[in-house]
Amino acid sequence: MSAGCWAHARRYFVDAVKVNKLDVVAIEFVKRMNDLFAVDGEARDGNLPLEARDELRQAKAAGLVDGIHDKLLAVKSTLLPKSKLGQAVDYTLGQWIRLKQFLKHPEIELSNNLAENSMRPIAVGRKNWIHVGSVEAGPKVAAILSVVETCKRLEIPVREYLADVLPGMADRKVAEVAALTPMAWKSRRSA
């Protein structure tokens, strides 16, 4: 099951507030979702491991999620479906199972903004790479960019990692590849 993005759901309610700055229902949903993000902010600020992050989410976020769901169901029938707020409620309810996945899996982020922002330069450059040379080039470029973005996320110097891993790559056995991932490389360096 894929996870939903709370930032996307929140954005719909923010759009509803832009249309009507006095819409107390839309404002309340934005506030409730801000509170949800604050729980994960607390975990991040405390540099909590996944187990502790999960405990914090269960203690503080689960109740917020239940409250949001109850409020969505309560207001749904009172809204025009094509209104900004109606669209926000419909979108959020349509994503509900996915939006709750973070409560079952502490490694899941509330928002996929980090992933989207890391892909933005790739999307912008895509037209420049249409004629990279061959049909096989696309998947290779995607693999390389995935490794580079993983290094950035793990705060690994990309050039140092590639200089260490790439020489002799063609002579390595497939079984050795797992030990060459950025995460494995960083773990060996930290030890």
Image (cartoon, helix red, strand yellow):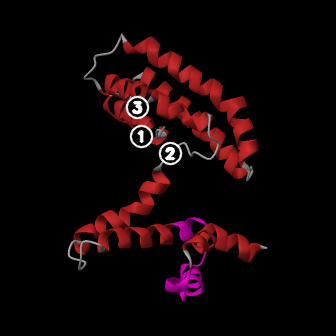
Tag nearer the camera, 2 or 3? 2
Q: Which three-letter amino acid code belongs to the residue tagged 2?
A: Ser
Q: Is residue 24 magenta?
A: no
Question: Which badge, 1 or 3, is on the more N-terminal residue?
Answer: 1
- The extreme right residue here reads 191
The residue identified by callout 2 is 111
Q: CA distance from mark 2 to mark 3?
A: 15 Å
Label 2, residues with CA under 10 Å away: few <14, some 14-19, many ≥20: some
Secondary structure beneath dot 3 equals helix
Q: Is residue 181 visible?
A: no
Q: Identify the residue shown where x is 42% and y is 69%.
A: 143
**Residue 156, position in %: x, y?**
61, 74
Question: Which badge, 1 or 2, is on the more N-terminal residue?
Answer: 1
Q: Is residue 124 above or below residue 25?
A: below
**Residue 56, position in %: x, y?**
72, 37
The residue identified by callout 3 is 13
